[in-house]
Image (cartoon, grey):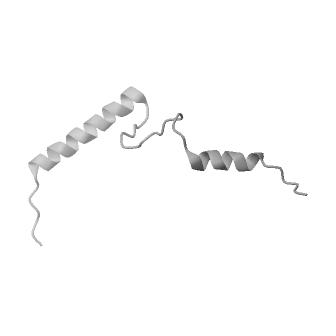
Amino acid sequence: MKQKKKNSVLEQVKASRKQSREEELKTHGKAINYSKIIESKKVYNRKKNKADADEALPFLFF
């Protein structure tokens, strides 16, 4: 089998990412997710409001 040529640019990018990640862990103490979307609490959410209303309904029906 032939050995693959190593791409020096790719290795540099990987090394910089690893270093950045380690610095982030040192400064913040935990990993930070940059891609997660955090929904505002002020936004109207019909599903959530409906689910909350169902809990308040009485269970005895006459």
Q: In the image, residue 31 lies at what x, y percent?
A: 41, 38
What residue is shown at x 43% (from left), y 31% (from top)? 29
Give the answer, above or below, for where 44 lies relative to 62: above
Q: Residue furthest top?
A: 27
Label total for image: 0
58 with respect to 52 (left or right): right
Q: Residue furthest front?
A: 62
Front-lying residue, 44 or 1: 44
Front-lying residue, 54 or 35: 54
Specify the quadrant that holds the N terminus: bottom left
Give the answer, above or below, for where 57 lies relative to 43: below
Q: Residue furthest bottom?
A: 1
Q: Please tell me in which quadrant of the rendered image residue 34 appears.
A: top left
Front-lying residue, 7 or 44: 44
Give the answer, above or below, for where 24 lies relative to 14: above
What residue is shown at x 21% (from left), y 42% (from top)? 15
Q: Please tell me in which quadrant of the rendered image residue 27 appears.
A: top left
55 with respect to 36 (left or right): right
29 with respect to 23 (left or right): right
Specify the quadrant that holds the C terminus: bottom right
Q: In the image, residue 36 lies at what x, y percent?
A: 41, 43
Front-lying residue, 10 or 53: 53
What residue is shown at x 32% (from left), y 35% (from top)? 22
Q: Please tell me in which quadrant of the rendered image residue 32 appears.
A: top left
